[in-house]
């Protein structure tokens, strides 16, 4: 009986990859990608540092995996409403409102984790930087497709503007707004500035 208990205590705990990624994502998003050490994440997730290295290859691999998860679970659903049949300007203003809103009764942190990672990419590892590039291209492609569809429906008034340039411009303005929200700026002020920046459309 005692031997069975000892054997049970000695078995390693199963590593819960998704739990670790959820803890890391929320911590990076809430506090900032450069404000959370791997040691702190280990404590929060109740895992050992060697297990993190075995699973992800190190902090760089962990950050890359977090961004992949964030893209699939947060960015893609958010970008999904760009494919609706609503008029271009209606979707644009909804996007501006959504990007600068603070949901009081939500556990969702302010701002955008991807925006924070993109701003600090020069201080991040190679694998994370490569994933940032991939995610950025994926995001811009969705915006570009949305703009091309708006042009076909004659809803995009800046007809002279290249679609990729317009996509990059719109995303840059939204990204800046989210960065300001994350830094604690008043959402009303940030939204007003964003609306002026997007008024060219």
Image (cartoon, rainbow, N blue to C red):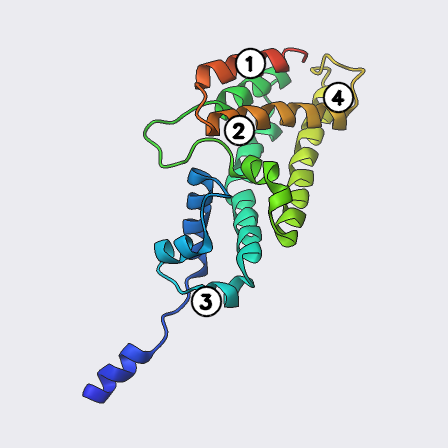
* C-alpha distance separating marks 2 and 3: 33 Å
Of labels 1 and 2, earlier in sequence is: 2
Of labels 4 and 2, earlier in sequence is: 4
Find residue 179 and name its label: 2
Foreground label between 4 and 2? 2
* C-alpha distance separating marks 1 and 3: 45 Å
- Mark 1 is surrounded, within 10 Å at the Cα level, by few (under 14), some (14 to 19) or many (20 or more) other residues, namely some
Circle 4 residue: 152
Along the horizontal axis of the image, is 147 left or right of 49?
A: right
Image location (x, y in percent) of residue 82? 60, 28
Of labels 4 and 3, earlier in sequence is: 3
Q: Residue at x 75, y 21 (%)?
A: 152
Element marked by disc 1 = helix
The answer to which image quadrant residue 101 occupies is top left
The answer to which image quadrant residue 91 occupies is top right
Element marked by disc 4 = helix
Check whether the beta carbons of the residues at disc 4 and disc 3 lie within 8 A of each other: no
* C-alpha distance separating marks 4 and 3: 52 Å
Q: Residue at x 47, y 39 (%)?
A: 32
- Mark 2 is surrounded, within 10 Å at the Cα level, by few (under 14), some (14 to 19) or many (20 or more) other residues, namely many
Circle 3 residue: 51
Element marked by disc 3 = helix
Find residue 193 and name its label: 1
């Amino acid at each position: 009986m005692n031997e069975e208990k000892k054997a049970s205590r000695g078995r390693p705990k199963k590593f819960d990859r998704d739990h670790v990624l959820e803890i890391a994502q929320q911590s990076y998003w809430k506090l900032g990608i450069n404000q959370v050490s791997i040691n702190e994440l280990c404590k929060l997730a109740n895992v050992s540092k060697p297990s993190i290295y075995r699973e992800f290859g190190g902090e760089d691999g962990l950050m890359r995996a977090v961004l992949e998860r964030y893209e699939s679970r947060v960015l893609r659903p958010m970008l999904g409403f760009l494919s609706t049949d609503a008029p271009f300007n209606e979707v644009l203003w909804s996007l501006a409102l959504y990007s600068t809103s603070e949901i009081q009764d939500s556990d969702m942190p302010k701002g955008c984790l991807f925006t924070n990672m993109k701003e600090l990419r020069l201080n991040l590892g190679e694998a994370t930087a490569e994933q940032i590039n991939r995610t950025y291209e994926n995001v811009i492609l969705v915006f570009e497709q949305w703009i091309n569809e708006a042009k076909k429906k004659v809803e995009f008034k800046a007809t002279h503007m290249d679609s990729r340039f317009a996509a990059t411009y719109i995303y840059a303005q939204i990204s800046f707004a989210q960065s300001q929200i994350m830094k604690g700026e008043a959402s009303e002020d940030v939204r007003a500035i964003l609306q002026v920046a997007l008024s060219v459309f």
